[in-house]
Image (cartoon, helix red, strand yellow):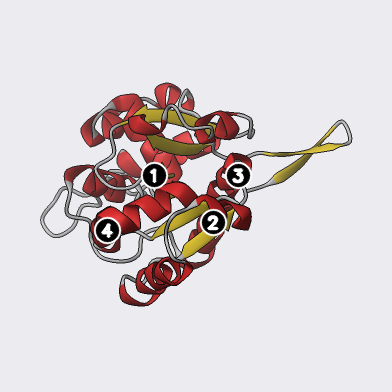
Amino acid sequence: MIEVENGGEKRCDCAPVLIFADDREAGSPVPAALKQIPGINLQFKRLAVGDYLVNGRCVFERKTVADFAASVIDGRLFTQAGKLARLSIPAALILEGRLADLAQVQVRRESLQGAMICLSLIFRLPVLRALGAAESASLMMYAAQQTERREEICGARYGRRPKRKRRLQLHILQGLPGIGPGRAAQLLATFGTVEAVMTASRQNLEQVQGIGAKTAAMIRDVLRESPRHYGNSPSPNLDI
């Protein structure tokens, strides 16, 4: 992430943050809040787990205080927590609302506290607080920035090797120079397959959001490098 001076203002010259929102969240105010943040590429699709997938790095389940209480009563919360805890990438729950909202919830305070203890200590899922939709959207953007910085320091590919096909495809693409999870997701969304990315021309790579001329040139240079000849292979003529 690089800040560039432009007419006295600072702008972020970096790849857009790709956020997949579950299509069942289309009616909530959070997608509208996300669209107000510069640098976010928001797309809708059905997610198997969670409400928001941020840059392929982390997953968020968002609940208002009322929905949180209802999910405690019907047991849905703990089923969802189990699925989130089994993901190969970090996950968290965003609890949205004010303390005053608790007065309208017909659930004992001790039950809600017990549920949050269970999430944090048993399922090891962080519970993040947000006052409203705008703050929930900001938390996701902050998460994308923090995980990107971590990868710049520690390396992009870490953790267990992903098992599902899409995650494996993204894992492979992150082996290319200058490609982190966000850019890998953009490449896969643009070209459709890993094979298409590997055979794409430099000009086509440059058209992908977040992939500039320098990164495209590095990718093509790595992919087309010829192997050296050893042993009985013909040697070039050298003038000595």
Point out the tag, 2 or 4, that comes first from the N-terminus. Answer: 4
Element type at mark 1: strand
Q: Is residue 9 visible?
A: yes
Rendered image: mark on residue 102: 2
Point out the tag, 3 or 4, that comes first from the N-terminus. Answer: 4
Name the residue that disc number 1 marks.
53
What is the three-letter code of the residue carrying label 4? Leu
Splitting the image into 4 quarters, where does residue 45 fall?
top left
What is the three-letter code of the residue carrying label 1? Leu
Element type at mark 2: helix
Q: Position of residue 139 (x, y in %)?
A: 57, 51
Crowding around mark 4 (Cα neighbors within 10 Å: few <14, some 14 to 19, many 20+) is: few
Left or right position of 215 against 12:
left
What is the three-letter code of the residue carrying label 3? Gly
The Cα atoms of the two marked residues, 2 and 4, are separated by 30 Å
Q: Position of residue 231 (x, y in %)?
A: 13, 60
Name the residue that disc number 3 marks.
132
Height in image: 119 above or below 8? below
